[in-house]
Image (cartoon, helix red, strand yellow):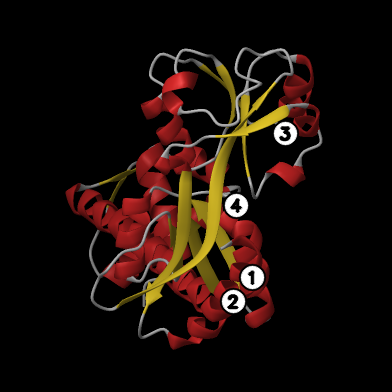
């Protein structure tokens, strides 16, 4: 039986071209490596090397063996990766959301319902979320709209509304509501990793420029000290102190109001209770 570590030593020798170079790279002695090369010849049952007085080289058969060795090593590495990934999925609930706010509510519910499982989350585009839930690569998805698809359960559970936060002396600060059209042309502060809200803001405000911040401390400082408007929602407004010093005005466009929906495969009934809890708990205060 061929040993993978010995095959790896053989592949490294083929790359380095000398026993000394391969031994140094592998952190083993030359005699140890030389014994491995002889053992591999015995295992293959053919000559793999041309041996000179002070040198050993691969012959034509040896080069073929080295090519196959590299393929086998790559396949073995991929096998290990796939098995580990399979095991990870057995113990992990993968959640993908189109925006961050739903995760603030959903992840604690899932962690409480499945205490023995890890919960992994990511912000993704809606079309990608749907396709991965359908394919089984994602257990629970969150979309900004309802979907109707065979085999997919869709549960509306959370409402989010977009606001703009103005400095007190801003030209639009005295408005009861604003529209994207009114905001278009004003440069704004924008958080990174806000999902579909990013694309929506840029699409509805093409004449505006956005100063995007990924560091929360820096974002808070800019909100306090900058004259640029920023955005908040009914779900996020209590999570930052700086916006409390500004005037918050709702955006009246229909696109600025969304009802998030949980999606998961109907056959995965273990998520039904968590979905119902999310819907019941949050509908009391937000829907």
Percent across and percent down for residue 205 are 42, 22
| Label located before the other in sequence (1 or 3) | 3
Looking at the rendered structure, the secondary structure element under dot 4 is: helix
Does residue 53 show up? no
Q: Is residue 172 above or below residue 214?
A: above
State the CA–CA distance, disc 1 to disc 4: 17 Å
Residue topped by disc 2: 280
Q: Nearer the viewer, residue 156 or 58?
A: 156
Q: Circle 4 sits on which residue?
A: 101
* Distance in Å between CA atoms under marks 3 and 4: 15 Å
Q: Are marks 3 and 4 in contact (CB under 8 Å)?
A: no
Sequence-first tag of 3 and 4: 4
Residue 165 visible at all = yes
Say which residue appears at 37% left-offset and 40% top-offset. Answer: 15
To which residue does mark 1 refer? 284
Earlier-in-chain disc, 3 versus 2: 3
- Against 156, residue 61 (above or below) is above
**Quadrant of image for the C terminus:** bottom right
């Amino acid at each position: 039986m061929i040993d993978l570590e010995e095959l790896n030593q053989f592949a490294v020798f083929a790359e380095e071209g000398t026993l000394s170079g391969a031994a140094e790279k592998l952190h083993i002695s030359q005699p140890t490596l030389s014994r491995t090369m002889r053992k591999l010849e015995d295992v293959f049952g053919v000559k793999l090397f041309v041996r000179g007085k002070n040198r050993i080289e691969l012959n034509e058969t040896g080069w073929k063996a080295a090519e196959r060795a590299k393929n086998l090593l790559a396949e073995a590495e991929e096998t290990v990766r796939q098995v580990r990934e399979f095991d990870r999925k057995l113990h992990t609930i993968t959640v993908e959301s189109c925006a961050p706010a739903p995760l603030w509510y959903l992840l604690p519910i899932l962690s409480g319902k499945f205490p023995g499982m890890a919960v992994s989350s990511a912000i993704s585009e809606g079309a990608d979320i749907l396709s991965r839930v359908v394919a089984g690569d994602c257990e629970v998805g969150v979309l900004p709209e309802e979907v109707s698809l065979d085999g997919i359960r869709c549960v509306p559970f959370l409402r989010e509304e977009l606001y703009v936060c103005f400095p007190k002396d801003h030209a639009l600060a005295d408005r009861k509501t604003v529209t994207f059209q009114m905001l278009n042309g004003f440069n704004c502060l924008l958080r990174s990793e806000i999902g579909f809200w990013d694309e929506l803001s840029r699409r509805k405000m093409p004449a505006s420029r956005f100063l995007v911040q990924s560091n929360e401390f820096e974002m808070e400082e800019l909100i306090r000290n900058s004259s640029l408007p920023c955005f908040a929602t009914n779900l996020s407004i209590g999570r930052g102190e700086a916006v409390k010093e500004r005037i918050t005005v709702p955006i009246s466009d229909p696109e600025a109001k969304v009802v998030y929906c949980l999606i998961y495969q109907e056959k995965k009934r273990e998520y039904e209770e968590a979905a119902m809890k999310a819907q019941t708990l949050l509908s009391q205060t937000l829907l």
